[in-house]
Amino acid sequence: MASSRQFKLAKESELRVEVGPDMPLRIRLLSGTAEIFGTELPPSNWLSISPRSKIAVFTWNGATIELDGISEVEYVADETPMVSYVNVHAILDARRAQAKASHSSNVDSPQGPRVIVVGPTDSGKSSLCKMLLSWACKQGWKPTYVDLDIGQGYITIPGCIAATPVEMPIDAVEGIPLEMPIVYFYGHTSPTANGDLYKVFVKELARTLERQFSGNAEARAAGMVINTMGWVEGLGYELLLNAIDTFNCDVVLVLGQEKLCSMLKEVLKTKPKVDVVKLHKSGGIVMRNQKVRQKARSLKIREYFYGPINDLSPHSNIVNFSDISVYRIGGGPQAPRSALPIGAEPVADPTRVVAININRDLLHLVLAVSYAKEPDQIISSNVAGYIYVTDIDVVRKKITYLAPCPGELPSKLLIVGTLTWLEG
Ligand SMILES: Nc1ncnc2c1ncn2[C@@H]1O[C@H](COP(=O)(O)OP(=O)(O)OP(=O)(O)O)[C@@H](O)[C@H]1O
């Protein structure tokens, strides 16, 4: 569909739009009020929607929307779960107000809600998180967004466990402005690569946030919204339970799966302070196959270096092999054979930090730059950012990489996992 067209939306309805891979599409609000995943559209201004986006423009009281450009799909729907979502927001808001009124950062005093959003892939978890965060910001709160979804990685890039305060409604195009996110580099897009390491980083992140909350009553009252992976069986389920426990969640929102909801209700019934709430998934969600997910991952990494609207220019740098040290986490025996009792087999340690030889295997990998000063601090340190290896010259022992900013790397300690990227 091309050229400019208008849609008159009745109250509590939404315009769903799917943008193709190379299609330019602009959108603007002509009258009334409307929002994209919780963030209001400014009146009259054109907003460019990124290629491959699938969005819903929802209105509470009615609106006229204009589209200009090409889309793959566009239609109006009047059946949405938005009223139930905003009801949840109202309850969370009341808890925040109660926590604020108690004026205390004492661990036993009321605290803001710690909400975890769970559900299978493509159930709308990330979209619901955005809405809850943006609506909270609109009320003046600065909630903390925690992203445990290593498969997509909304805060920085896939393969990470991260958190950031959200201070204003999330921009539909540019995402969350990142001042100082706390990021741990797990380095893989599936938890099966090293489930124990995933748990270790979840614990580190929870501990860091707990420390911040104890000194910041405002953040503590605003609480957290936690996004999770869509794998809800086997190890995925175990990691969900682990996250609920580690972050001391008191609200579990289950999207679109009865079975998961009743399983969680059953295991959490011993914790009366934890509410498990089932919510319907939106009919607007389009299922994404493996290929589309892989593409989304790749785009997310591209966005890190080039900006969400191609507004950044990364820098290419060259360093000697001897100027950096690269470490892999996991694998390798926990202790040398000589240190083990006779007959005992060495066990692979999931959190062992192993120095690796720099060679062409690093080509096209994304490496994290650790804040650690020594290798033994790598597990407990978050990361400053990432570099992308574009060339390895084994003869001259030089490595060429792309970094988001010019100048020296903030640290010489780099972490490698299995996160690859083919620029494009
Ligand atoms: N109401 C809606 N109308 C149109 N598209 C929607 C709607 N809600 C969500 N989407 C789109 O559907 C896709 C899947 O939604 P979302 O990313 O929120 O699901 P998810 O459960 O977090 O997925 P995953 O676990 O796979 O990361 C996204 O592209 C999102 O923008």
Image (spheres, grey):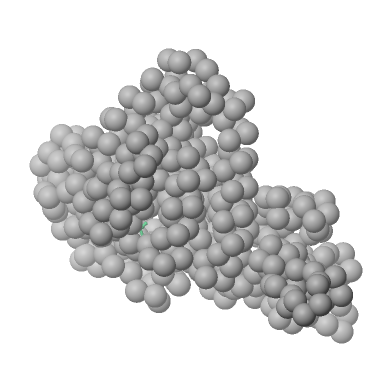
What is the x, y in percent for residue 208? Answer: 62, 40
Residue 316 versus residue 210: which sits nearer the camera?
A: 210
Number of numbered discs on residues:
0
Give the quadrant of residue 238.
bottom left
The image quadrant where one finds ligand 1 is: bottom left
Residue 245 versus residue 136: which sits nearer the camera?
A: 245
What is the x, y in percent for residue 132? Answer: 35, 39
Whether residue 241 appears in this view of the structure is yes
Give the residue displayed 44% in from the left and 23% down from the top: 110
What is the x, y in percent for residue 417? Answer: 65, 69
* Quarter of the image that includes the N terminus: bottom left
What is the x, y in percent for residue 172? Answer: 38, 47
The furthest residue to the front:
342
Give the residue displayed 48% in from the left and 50% down from the top: 243
Q: Is residue 358 left or right of residue 142?
A: right
Give the residue displayed 18% in from the left and 54% down from the top: 5
Give the quadrant of residue 302.
bottom right
Whether residue 14 appears in this view of the structure is no
Give the residue displayed 23% in from the left and 57% down from the top: 258
Residue 63 versus residue 216: which sits nearer the camera?
A: 216
Q: Is residue 337 left or right of residue 112?
A: right
Residue 13 versus residue 275: which sits nearer the camera?
A: 275
Q: Is residue 199 left or right of residue 47?
A: right
